[in-house]
């Protein structure tokens, strides 16, 4: 049998067992368990500021209740979806309130109950930083092609030329300087990929226009979409800002709507100048590149050993102090 929680207590038992084997999901599991242990009859309230110190479970529960327009909830059940990756039988699915969940952008689901009303489930995206200073939080990770497909399926037109520019930026096979001998003549920078300013100009300009004109829509897609059949896209984002040497820890809490608006007000599409100063392909002195970004979202080539040519979007380090 796959893991099918029958109620909050059963869900907590499932999570406790998995948590002991997969420490990377401890925060989400503990958050869900703490929500399940909270009384819900008191009036709900939202934090006065997005960044706060205190019990994230209590603040998140109050925010979720007010987010759906209720004054209170009689009961709450939470489950952490890290269990999707750790089911014992390999089915990799959970059932939440009769809905089968196979892949989900939400990390925690909170189901709220009140009187005779139908229960409502709120998805929560959870980010955490365990360093002394805030770091970039990964938001979306895919191939250049898959990202363009996501944009097209969401009603945003992307030409083949623009997709090619993005594949050049990522260094996909067939789109690297290494694939064209003439591109290597006199080249003194990384031969495995084209930097943003080196991609084909027509496609690059189209992408910059798209990120400018569709900023809100794309930001929302990155925050909420990753899977085509996702039944519980996140409505809220909870972010542990950094690791403090004492309790209570510090967190930031936003609705996705709020974060999309604040991100646009923070800045539109922009390019930050940088140089590659580490690794095998360091830039010679005086060489600079352009790093595309929009709002609090930064875009880069993944570069990891496992998936070096993936397209990666991050939340800017410390964005919650800046917006």
Image (spheres, rainbow, N blue to C red):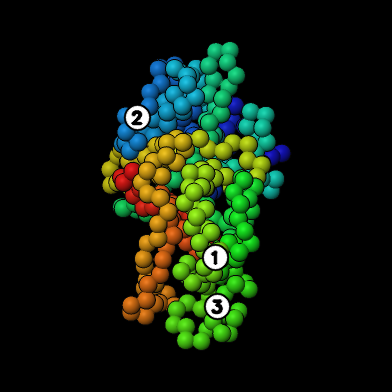
- From the image, tell me which residue sits under label 2: 47
Under tag 2, what secondary structure? loop
Q: Residues within 10 Å of mark 2 (few under 14, many from 20)?
A: some
Q: Quadrant of residue 271?
A: bottom left
Measured as percent of width and height from the top left, residue 165 is found at 56, 66
Measured as percent of width and height from the top left, residue 191 is found at 51, 78
In this view, the residue in front, 45 or 146, is: 146
Q: Residues within 10 Å of mark 1 (few under 14, many from 20)?
A: few
- From the image, tell me which residue sits under label 1: 202
Tell me the tag on residue 177: 3
Under tag 1, what secondary structure? helix
Which is nearer the N-term, disc 1 or disc 2? 2
Give left or right: position of 173 versus 169: right
- Give the distance between the C-alpha atoms of the residues marked 3 and 1, in whole angstroms: 18 Å
Nearer to us of marks 3 and 1 is 1
In this view, the residue in front, 79 or 300, is: 300
**Image height of 158 relative to 120, above or below:** below
Residue located farthest toward the top when viewing the structure as drawn: 116
Measured as percent of width and height from the top left, residue 130 is found at 37, 50
Give left or right: position of 120 versus 31: right
Tell me the tag on residue 69: none
Q: Quadrant of the C terminus?
A: top left
Nearer to us of marks 3 and 2 is 3
Which is nearer the N-term, disc 3 or disc 1? 3
Residue at x 37%, y 72% (from the top left corner): 288
**Image height of 286 relative to 237, above or below:** below
């Amino acid at each position: 049998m796959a893991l099918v929680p029958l109620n909050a207590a059963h869900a907590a038992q499932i999570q406790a067992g998995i948590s002991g084997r997969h420490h990377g999901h401890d925060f989400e599991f503990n958050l869900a368990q703490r929500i399940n242990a909270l009384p819900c009859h008191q009036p709900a309230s939202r934090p006065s500021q997005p960044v706060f110190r205190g019990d994230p479970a209590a603040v998140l529960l109050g925010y979720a209740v007010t987010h759906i327009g209720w004054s209170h909830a009689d009961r709450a059940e939470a489950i952490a979806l890290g269990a999707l990756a750790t089911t014992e039988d390999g089915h990799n699915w959970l059932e939440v309130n009769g809905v089968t969940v196979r892949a989900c952008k939400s990390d925690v689901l909170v189901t709220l109950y009140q009187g005779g009303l139908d229960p409502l489930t709120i998805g929560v995206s959870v980010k955490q930083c365990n360093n002394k200073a805030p770091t970039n939080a990964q938001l979306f990770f895919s191939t250049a092609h898959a990202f363009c497909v996501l944009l097209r399926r969401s009603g945003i037109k992307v030409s083949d030329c623009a997709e090619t520019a993005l594949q050049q930026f990522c260094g996909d096979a067939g789109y690297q300087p290494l694939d064209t001998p003439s591109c290597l003549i006199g080249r003194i920078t990384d031969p495995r990929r084209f930097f943003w300013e080196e991609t084909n100009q027509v496609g690059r300009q189209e992408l910059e226009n798209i990120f400018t004109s569709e900023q809100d829509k794309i930001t929302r897609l990155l925050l909420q979409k990753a899977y085509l059949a996702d039944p519980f896209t996140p409505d809220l984002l909870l972010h542990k800002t950094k690791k403090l040497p004492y309790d209570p820890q510090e967190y930031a809490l936003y609705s996705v709507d709020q974060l999309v608006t604040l991100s646009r007000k923070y800045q539109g599409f922009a390019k930050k100048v940088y140089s590659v100063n580490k690794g095998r392909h360091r830039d010679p002195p005086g060489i600079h590149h352009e790093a595309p970004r929009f709002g609090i979202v930064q875009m880069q080539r993944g570069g990891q050993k496992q998936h070096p040519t993936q397209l990666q979007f991050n939340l800017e380090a410390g964005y919650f102090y800046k917006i």
